[in-house]
Image (cartoon, rainbow, N blue to C red):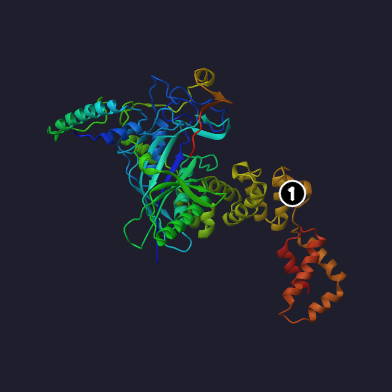
Amino acid sequence: MQWETVIGLEIHAQLATKSKIFSGASTAYGAEPNSQACSIDLAMPGVLPVLNREAVRMAITFGVAINAEIGRRSVFARKNYFYPDLPKGYQISQFELPIVGRGEVEILLEDAEPKRIGVTRAHLEEDAGKSLHEDFHGMTGIDLNRAGTPLLEIVSEPDMRSAREAVAYARKIHQIVQYLGICDGNMQEGSFRCDANVSVRPPGGPLGTRAELKNLNSFRFLERAINIEVERQIDLIEGGGKVVQETRLYDADRDETRAMRSKEEANDYRYFPDPDLLPVEVEEGLIEAVREAMPELPDARRERFQREFGLGAYDASVLTANRGLADFFEQTAQVAGDAKLAANWVMGELSGALNKAGLELAESPVTADRLGEMLLRIVDKTLSGKIAKQVFEAMWLGEGSADEIIEARGLKQITDSSAIEAVVDEVLAANPEQVANYRAADDKKKPKMLGFFVGQVMKQSKGKANPQQVNQLLLKKL
Amino acid sequence: MSLKRSEVEKIAHLARLAMSKDELDAVTGDLSNILDLVAQMEEADTGGVEPMAHPLHMAQRLRADEVTEEDRREQFQAIAPLTEAGLYLVPRVIE
């Protein structure tokens, strides 16, 4: 039987504010446990939350970026449940009136038409603390540093029909929040987390019962978990069973999903407006200011790279995958004055070196300016592509700028034709037999045989002779 | 009686309140009276009244995004029943 998969995602993006959403405690990652949990985060008696302006601005920025309605009047509500990493016994969230209303994003899969995915809403809320279940004499350790960190929960429509679409959508949101500078997107540190609501149905039929998948802390796990869950649900239904609505945890080690807790009761959160917080009113002026300060978004930038620099669709999308890479490329291209060359080096040599060293772009020992300066020496024919790789390696190892390395190592390409001619003559004189063979060969075989002489000349000149000139001179003399 | 006893039991469980049989009976009656009063108020015509999320006619004031709190872990943990390595310890939570 045919089955159609239906997926909706809930994404939690930690907003990159300095302080928490309702308190002045720091949000910096990796601090000593509980050293950044103040009396408000700990729910001490008598404290009151005060909303962080920057968290509001960031939420609105996201809303404007996805063309969503901005809730001019939004209300915070209490979501009630008991868990030790939630000191108040409720999470301050938004329920009926979120700050960001309906919007949409476009995803692009390799072999398909662009598809629009609806964003139902995005609301502000506070993060909970962390529970550490390892080895505290059978007890659980609680670190409340994360409690109160601002989150933007982005809820999609059930518009995705495959795990690949779900991953493309998640990547798109990830890309947008990073471009906007409102979330660092670090999935290992939990700054960007995905939950997936997955169900199956006969194509076009009414929605099936969904399971909610949690613990998807990488795009790879997201795809894997959805595919496994879809298989499980289909097997279950075809075997005469029924899917129950529940939360399931993805276990990457065993590559399976398993039930976490029955949602029926846990789901009764008894939301009500938080009397400690007044409604948030967003003035038109703030929305206008956000609109004006909006950076160029990934789709617009990709199109501009294609138009302005003549890049192919694939190159342009790789280079705009994140803002840091796009900035790096654009700066390199500007210094080098040759965008295609810059694109090749950023995606090739530079990305390769970063991968090999396990470094992020921001940690690259070769800056965009330095790379651009080196490419300038390829453009002006000081360097051949081959020698440039040596220069790049030396720059990577911190031996200085391209010009310094070229000078220190005497790597300047030989473009003086009389110097090259001398080497060519030497090579021809040393190989009379090959010369005779070449001259006797038919035209079809000649190009291949020419390679021998080019190789010899390059060897003699230690790779510094300009290859085009070598070719021309050889053809003339043979 | 607008509330059933079983509903009150469920609410008590969600709020982690242990209640005796007598208490449950009494509370079911009290809560039902409150809901009946609300039902009575709902009969009033509120067509021209703006709904409100808060009794104060004010909007939320916002604060600047600045770190103003320092580490006072030692003081906070002095009143905690159990701590270790900077963590608060609680009975094991199984997921």
Residue sitting at 33 percent across and 41 percent down? Answer: A70
Q: Which quadrant of the view contains residue A360?
A: top right
Q: How many marks?
A: 1
Q: Which quadrant of the view contains residue A76?
A: top left
Q: Nearer the viewer, residue A17 or A326?
A: A17
Residue A43: give x, y in percent of width and height: 42, 24
Q: Is residue A89 above or below residue A322?
A: above
Label 1: few (<14), some or many (≥20) within 10 Å? Answer: many
Q: Is residue B49 above or below residue A318?
A: above
Residue sitting at 31 percent across and 39 percent down? Answer: A71
Residue sitting at 28 percent across and 33 percent down? Answer: B8
Q: Which structural element holds mark 1?
A: helix
Q: Which quadrant of the view contains residue B49?
A: top left
Q: Is residue A461 above or below residue A362?
A: below
Q: Residue furthest front?
A: B21
Tag 1, which chain?
A: A
Residue A357 visible from this viewpoint: yes
Residue A311 visible from this viewpoint: no
Residue that carries the numbered disc 1 in the rendered image = A406
Residue A158: give x, y in percent of width and height: 37, 52
User: Would residue A97 appear left or right of A82 to someone viewing this image?
Assistant: left
- Identify the image quadrant of the N terminus of chain A: bottom left
Residue A275: give x, y in percent of width and height: 31, 27
Q: Amino acid at mark 1?
A: Ile
User: Would residue A178 appear left or right of A97 to someone viewing this image?
Assistant: right
Residue sitting at 57 percent across and 54 percent down? Answer: A339
Q: Nearer the viewer, residue B77 or B9?
A: B9
Residue A133: give x, y in percent of width and height: 54, 35
